[in-house]
């Protein structure tokens, strides 16, 4: 899951970024409104966390602009103010939820999870393909009831493949949802990580779940 954070206060931005990365999210950060709007337009995000008071362009204006351009990623607004008027304005401009500073990271995380789940319109937090299971709350992966230890990147990659199970996932889709802006598309980094992941989830098992589709990408499916 890839998240864009637009926050001009560096301390708060790095606190949120660090926390989200620990939860295996992929995070891009913009420190002003113009750049935030630009990044939200050119990249594909599963969620946008948007501060209201920003230099360049404020959060409300960005939110309106994104919705006008049919960018439907859920938006969580952050603000130092807790006046009802701002809340109403924020939600009117197209935001999905609202969080008042200061807040505990756990509170932000809870809102993030709800918004990401709402997008998927699923209530379950466990993804399953054949005997492979991924628990999105505890970040645990099991194959045939045996726990599989994954790195943060392998986990994010597997989660994305499982969310899109039974359909071809292209390298472009993977790079957009599992890597952040630092991704260099001229390397074979995705294939390398797919191989690491394959080794961990398939070694010793008869049934192959993760398949390479030549010239297209990858597919995770239950062969039955
Ligand atoms: Ca601010």
Image (cartoon, grey):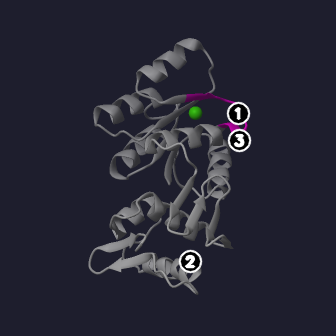
Q: Residue at x 43, y 70 (%)?
A: 222
Q: Residue at x 45, y 75 (%)?
A: 209
Total marks drawn? 3
Determine which of the numbered discs, if any, sits on residue 106 in the image.
3
Image spot of residue 7 (x, y percent): 56, 40
Is label 1 or label 3 in front?
Answer: 3
Q: Label 1 vs label 2: CA separation? A: 38 Å
Question: Which label's residue is closer to the chain start, 3 or 2?
Answer: 3
- Crowding at dot 3, Cα within 10 Å, few <14 / some 14-19 / many 20+, comes out as few
- In this orientation, which residue lies closer to the viewer: 157 or 20? 157
x and y percentages locating residue 52 in the rendered image = 52, 29
**Residue 27, percent across and down?**
54, 54
Give yes or no for contact between labels 1 and 2 (Cβ–Cβ under 8 Å).
no
Q: Residues within 10 Å of mark 2 (few under 14, many from 20)?
A: many
On the question of residue 189 being in view, the answer is yes
Is 17 rendered above or below residue 220?
above
Q: Magenta stretch: give its range.
A: 98-107
Instruction: Residue 12: name its quadrant.
Output: top right
Label 2 sits on a secondary structure element that is: helix
- Residue pictured at 52% horizontal, 61% vertical: 128
Q: CA distance from mark 3 to mark 2?
A: 30 Å
Q: Which residue is mark 1?
A: 103
Say whether residue 180 is visible: no
Q: Find numbered disc 3 in the image and state the secondary structure of the residue it sits on.
A: helix
Query: Is residue 106 located in the magenta-colored stretch of the structure?
Result: yes
Residue at the spot 37% in from the left edge and 73% down from the top edge: 218
Question: Disc 2 designates what residue?
Answer: 201
Return the residue nearer the eye: 210 or 179.
210
């Amino acid at each position: 899951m890839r998240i864009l954070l637009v926050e001009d206060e560096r301390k708060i931005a790095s606190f949120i970024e660090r926390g989200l990365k620990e939860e295996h999210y992929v995070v891009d950060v913009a420190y002003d409104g113009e750049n935030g709007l630009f990044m939200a337009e050119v990249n594909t995000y599963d969620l946008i966390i948007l501060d209201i008071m920003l230099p360049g362009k404020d959060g409300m204006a960005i939110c309106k602009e994104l919705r006008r351009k049919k960018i439907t990623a859920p938006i969580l607004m952050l603000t130092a103010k807790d006046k009802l008027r701002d809340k109403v304005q924020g939600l009117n401009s197209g935001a999905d939820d609202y969080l008042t500073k200061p807040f505990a990271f756990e509170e932000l995380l809870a809102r993030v999870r709800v918004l990401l789940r709402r997008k998927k319109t699923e209530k379950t937090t466990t993804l399953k393909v054949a005997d492979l299971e991924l628990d999105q709350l505890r970040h645990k992966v099991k194959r045939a009831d045996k726990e599989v230890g994954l790195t943060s990147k392998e986990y994010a990659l597997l989660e994305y493949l499982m969310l899109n199970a039974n359909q071809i996932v292209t390298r472009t889709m993977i790079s957009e949802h599992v890597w952040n802006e630092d991704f260099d598309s001229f390397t074979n980094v995705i294939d390398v990580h797919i191989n690491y992941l394959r080794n961990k989830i398939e070694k010793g098992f008869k049934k192959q779940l993760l398949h390479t589709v030549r010239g297209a990408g990858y597919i995770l499916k239950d062969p039955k």
